[in-house]
């Protein structure tokens, strides 16, 4: 149906939202459907749209560690620091899922590791609390690079 809709230029279908405010792109990103995400983006899906709880396609992909989808969305210029209803960001979801590659990609794309959830945790706090040493190392390395750049 989406294929047919895009062929007859019905943009309202490709960005249609369900009762939760999710678009087809959000569902595809949340379920790791790389080919569907690519198709939707090529046919006008808006990667900036948010669900009713301010969920983004990027946060949904990060929460599951779908690095290929995360890269596609980052290449579209989505906001890496977009927060949802409880202050969660794509970086915080990637950290929570222990998705090291996603964490690295997000930090390299400008994700702010100091943003806190409504409960007061930032990405490093969360990595430490969950015992995710590899994620901690990625965040520490990123912060050290930032400090070195400030000194120069």
Image (spheres, helix red, strand yellow):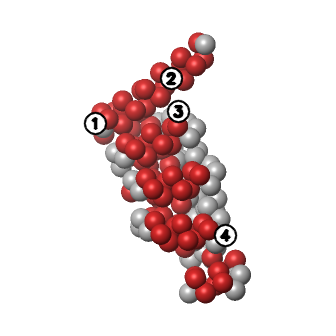
| First reached walking from the N terminus: tag 2 or tag 3 | 3
Identified at 40% across, 44% down, the residue is: 101
Q: CA distance from mark 1 to mark 4?
A: 40 Å
Numbered disc total: 4
Check residue 131 in the rendering and tell me which mark sits there, or answer none.
Answer: 1
Please name the residue that numbered disc 2 is placed on: 145
Q: Secondary structure at mark 3?
A: loop
Asked if disc 3 and disc 4 are in contact, CB closer than 8 Å, the reply is: no
**To which quarter of the image does residue 47 belong?**
bottom right
| First reached walking from the N terminus: tag 3 or tag 1 | 3
Check residue 114 in the rendering and tell me which mark sits there, or answer none.
Answer: 3
Which class describes the residues within 10 Å of circle 2: few (<14), some (14-19), or many (20+)? few
Which class describes the residues within 10 Å of circle 3: few (<14), some (14-19), or many (20+)? few
Which class describes the residues within 10 Å of circle 1: few (<14), some (14-19), or many (20+)? few
**Is residue 20 among what the camera can see?**
no
| First reached walking from the N terminus: tag 2 or tag 1 | 1
Q: Secondary structure at mark 4?
A: loop
Q: Where is residue 57 shown, x and y percent of the image?
A: 53, 60
Identified at 36% across, 37% down, the residue is: 135
Q: Where is residue 74 shown, x and y percent of the image?
A: 57, 51
Q: CA distance from mark 4 to mark 2?
A: 36 Å
Check residue 44 in the rendering and tell me which mark sits there, or answer none.
Answer: 4
């Amino acid at each position: 149906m989406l294929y047919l809709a895009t062929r007859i230029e019905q943009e309202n279908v490709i960005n249609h939202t369900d009762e939760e405010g999710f678009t087809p792109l959000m569902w595809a990103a949340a379920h790791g459907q790389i080919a569907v995400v690519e198709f939707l983006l090529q046919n006008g899906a808006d990667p900036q749209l948010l669900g009713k709880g301010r969920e983004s396609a990027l946060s949904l992909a990060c929460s599951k560690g779908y690095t290929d989808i995360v890269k596609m969305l980052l290449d579209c210029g989505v906001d890496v620091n977009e927060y949802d209803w409880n202050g969660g960001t794509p970086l915080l979801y990637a950290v929570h899922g222990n998705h090291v590659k996603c964490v690295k990609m997000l930090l390299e794309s400008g994700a702010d590791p100091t943003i806190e959830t409504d409960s007061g945790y930032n990405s490093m706090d969360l990595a430490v609390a969950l015992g995710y040493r590899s994620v901690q190392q990625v965040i520490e390395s990123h912060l050290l690079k930032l400090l070195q750049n400030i000194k120069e």
